[in-house]
């Protein structure tokens, strides 16, 4: 069984401020972890993924996330927010098997203000 | 350009009516998925197919049906048995292999509403 908890359904930051979106996971097998971004009325786009290699993962658009097994966390960060980062962000977990399903969190909507 | 095409972008259903959402991919992907997205609930898996002529129920399959007659196509039918069909529906696909879910591509979605 696997699950994802995203803390905070809405996060608001000022332009230029640090972005921190929280994700905690539960998995009975070594997890693969993902962050996706969704812009309004569009599909999801992969930001970054952890697949048991380096624990600090760098993704597109300046985002990165760190896998911390002891804390069962995979928080998403960006040093300086930009207006174009405003979107909904989803954390997801899966196992490594070919038949493993992807389980999504409930999403965090990021608002960026001037 | 390769990608996943979902149509229509907006769809309205009358009471008791079946409607079909289209999903086509030209990525030569083996596996295809249908997700339902409701506000505040994230994405929930409806059906998935790992190979032509085979598909499995996801977490919320009741009231839905699918077919996979061609590798490129995975249409979803929302039947009259689905009492709360209003949602945003997303189709996704991936190539098969050991690195599961690493290359999951999403379509741009269909918003289904009830008249």
Image: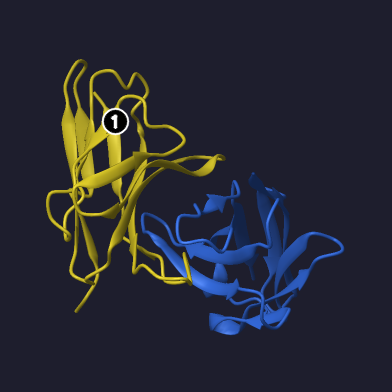
Of residues B41 and B114, the one drawn nearer to the viewer in this rendering:
B41
Q: Give the left or right position of residue A50, taking residue B35 as reference.
A: right
The answer to which image quadrant residue B112 occupies is: top left
Query: Callout 1: few (<14), some (14-19), or many (20+) C-alpha neighbours within 10 Å?
Result: many
- Label 1's element? strand
Q: Residue sitting at 52 percent across and 64 percent down? A: A36
Q: Residue sitting at 81 percent across and 66 percent down? A: A69
Q: Give the left or right position of residue B60, taking residue A6 as reference.
A: left
Of residues A81 and A64, the one drawn nearer to the viewer in this rendering:
A64
Q: Residue sitting at 28 percent across and 18 percent down? A: B81
The residue sitting at the right extreme is A70
Answer whether residue B40 is visible to the viewer in this image.
yes
Chain shown blue: that is A
Of residues B8 and A103, the one drawn nearer to the viewer in this rendering:
A103
The answer to which image quadrant residue A14 occupies is: bottom right
Screen quadrant of the C terminus of chain A: bottom right
Q: Chain of mark 1?
A: B
Residue bearing the label numbered 1: B64
Chain shown yellow: that is B
Q: Is residue B87 above or below residue A55?
A: above
Q: Is residue B76 above or below residue A80?
A: above
The answer to which image quadrant residue A30 occupies is: bottom right
């Amino acid at each position: 069984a696997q699950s994802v908890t995203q803390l905070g359904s809405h996060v608001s930051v000022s332009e230029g401020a640090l972005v921190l979106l929280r994700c905690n996971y539960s998995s009975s097998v070594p997890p693969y972890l993902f962050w996706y971004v969704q812009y309004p009325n569009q599909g999801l786009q992969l930001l970054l993924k952890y697949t048991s290699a380096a624990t600090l993962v760098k993704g597109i658009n300046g985002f990165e996330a760190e896998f911390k097994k002891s804390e069962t966390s995979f928080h998403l960060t960006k040093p300086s927010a930009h207006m174009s980062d405003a979107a909904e962000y989803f954390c997801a977990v899966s196992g490594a098997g070919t038949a493993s399903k992807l389980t999504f969190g409930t999403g965090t909507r990021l608002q960026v203000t001037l | 350009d390769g990608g996943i095409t979902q149509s229509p972008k907006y769809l309205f259903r009358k009471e008791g009516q079946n409607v079909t959402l289209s999903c086509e991919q030209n990525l030569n992907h083996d596996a295809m998925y249908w997700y339902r997205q409701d506000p505040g609930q994230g994405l929930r898996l409806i059906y998935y197919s790992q190979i032509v002529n085979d598909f499995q129920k996801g977490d919320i399959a009741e009231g839905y049906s699918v077919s996979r007659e061609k590798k490129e196509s995975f249409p979803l039918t929302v039947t009259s048995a689905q009492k709360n069909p209003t949602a945003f529906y997303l189709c996704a696909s991936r190539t098969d292999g050991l690195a599961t879910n690493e290359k999951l591509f999403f379509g741009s979605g269909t918003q289904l509403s009830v008249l």
